[in-house]
Image (cartoon, rainbow, N blue to C red):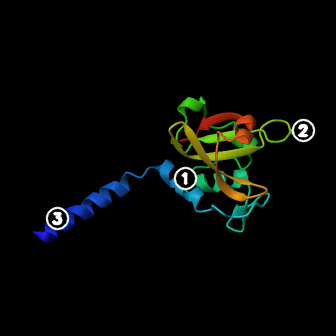
Amino acid sequence: MGFTSCSSTKTTRKTSKKSITKIDRVVANALKYKGVRYKFGGTTKKGMDCSGIVYVSFLEENVQLPRVSRNMAKRGTEIPLKKVKKGDLLFFKTSKRGRGINHVGLIVSVKKGQIRFIHSTTSRGVITSLLSEKYWKNAFVKATKIL
């Protein structure tokens, strides 16, 4: 009898593992790089830039995106912030002299209206931030759904 209950527990675990979506895997891929230093053009644990982490996280799930944030912003479907979910992308204009989008982040969670995203910054490397932080809220341009 003990074997049957143990077996059903294993079955339950297997079932829950299968319910992990491609979006969950993309986000998990990105989170593996948390703490990696910033490197312009970087796409490895030795260094990452903002579009590098998004590019690699999707590529590991066989989803090909452009390598540069302003080109990534042309992909997917634009969505209102009220409808964003885990796995969606946020685009920013952080340069005063730049011409448009130059930064991207991947949403890791949306809880009680708080949007947390992972990205790479020149000063702190790969980190998670809240969109409600003044700097990011002011720099925000748009959100898109890829998957």
Q: Secondary structure at mark 1?
A: helix
Q: Secondary structure at mark 3?
A: helix
Within 10 Å of the Cα at label 2, are there few (<14), some (14-19), or many (20+) other Cα atoms? few
Percent coordinates x, y for residue 113 in the rendering:
54, 36
Give me the C-alpha separation between circle 1 and circle 2. Answer: 31 Å
Quadrant housing residue 34? bottom right
Describe residue 113's horizontal placement relative to residue 94 as left or right. Answer: left
Q: Who's the residue at 34% across and 55% down the image? A: 16
Q: How many marks?
A: 3
Write down the residue under mark 1: 27
Write down the residue under mark 3: 5
Q: Amino acid at mark 2?
A: Arg
The mark that comes first in sequence, 3 or 2, is: 3
Write down the residue under mark 2: 97
The mark that comes first in sequence, 3 or 1, is: 3
Q: Who's the residue at 68% across and 58% down the image? A: 126
